[in-house]
Amino acid sequence: MNAPRGLLIAAPRSGSGKTTITLALLAALARRGVAVRAAKSGPDYIDPAFHAAATGRPGLNLDSWAMPPALVDHLASTAAQGAELLVAEGAMGLFDGVATEPGRTGAGADIAARLGLPVLLVLDVSGQSQTAAAVLRGFLTHDPRVRIAGVVLNKLGSERHTRMIREAVAPLGVPILGTVPREATIVLPERHLGLVQAGETDDLAARLATLADLGERHLDLDGIRAAAGPLGLAAGDAGALIAPPGQRIALAQDAAFSFMYGHLLAGWRALGAEIRPFSPLADEAPDPSCDVCWLPGGYPELHAGRLAAADRFLEGTRRFAQAKPVHGECGGYMALGQTLTDAEGTTHAMLGLLDLETSFARRKMNLGYRAARLMAPSPLGATGETVRGHEFHYATVITRGGDEPIAELSDAEGRPLGAAGSRRGHVTGGFFHAIARG
């Protein structure tokens, strides 16, 4: 096999069609038998699951703010082993990040520059024609670290529309590697945290087949492969990975609890930890032989009634917490509380392991990178350690009660946000999603 090559699929803004184009490319290449691996730039649980479904290989996140450069190198190098092509999908706009040190902004451009990935730029050209050339010209000159290797014109209205943009773009010397008509756009189902999860999407195989058809019909697959560049990979260092919280880890895993970063699980397994999944929605309890129980984020607010009626899950987790650590992230944190109020205003009893009441009826978006300095030992690390990650939720805290906080939080630019999360006995949790040690 030749040395792996790679590219980053990016756009000027969210909603340009990056995910559709990425999945169409991945599915079409996989159909051709290309060994392709995909990564998502930035904090995202949902897109990597679709990437995995399209490629047949595990999804991956690469994050220039939350991960130190050596960890980005390590994860990318590991992902590229056995692959012909690494396709990374950006988030928001190519240069959108936070105001912090160069190369650590969280922008897709950082990942492209770090790994030497040429950029395939997706332009939503609905409502414009020659102006698309001006937009592309700006991207060509904005950041000398980043090379635009090709462009996909998305949401084209007609052959005349396509011809006008082609003529305007031609002097720039950037190849047009895809022309996708407006009617070919495939809409994947969404909910409040983004796309409906891959595992819950009806007829996923059929949808991916349709996306592969789109890729074969409207993307220059050979041209895109040729535009990919050799990966500038260093071996990197896995030292910033969060250590396994135990030798045997009971991991809640189903439609209510699914937001777990693949690099964490892979890192824990590489260090000898054993992951034992269980499903609260199937009324399963954590294996009592495990050393720690981890309740990840997800959508417990959509399944609160079933969780409240899952007696084996509730009682088994309560017994587990009497002697061993239980940690909850975001949705898992909500499940650890006394009650959870759903969108209809119905209040459901939860595990009652923390003095916490949350509500999805009172919706307020909380979104952003977070640095968490731990105030006590927990499955995230030792007292005083800093862990980087993010928050993204709509639920609100009605009361946090008398429990002590788990961490002092600051935002991506270092501004303090105060104490957050909860701890009581062996139980800890918070809305914070951990990505790597700070």
Image (cartoon, rainbow, N blue to C red):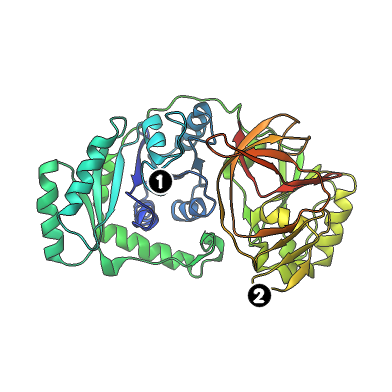
Q: Amino acid at mark 1?
A: Gly
Q: Name the residue located 66 percent from the left edge and 52 percent from the top edge.
A: 330
Quarter in which the C terminus is drawn: top right
Nearest the viewer among 187 and 253 is 187
Q: Can residue 278 be seen? A: no
Label 1: which residue?
90
Quarter of the view holding residue 297: bottom right
Neighbor class of circle 1 (other Cα within 10 Å; few <14, some 14-19, many 20+) is many
Q: Where does the image place residue 357, in percent across and percent down from the top left?
A: 76, 60
Label 2: which residue?
344
Task: Indicate which disc, 2 or 1, sits on the residue closer to the N terminus.
Answer: 1
Q: Where does the image place residue 285, in percent across and percent down from the top left?
A: 80, 58
Q: Looking at the picture, does residue 268 appear above or below residue 16?
A: above
Q: Amino acid at mark 2?
A: Glu
Neighbor class of circle 2 (other Cα within 10 Å; few <14, some 14-19, many 20+) is few
Would residue 406 appear left or right of 164 to someone viewing this image? right
Q: Name the residue located 36 percent from the left edge and 62 percent from the top edge.
A: 211
Q: Looking at the picture, does residue 317 appear above or below residue 236?
A: below
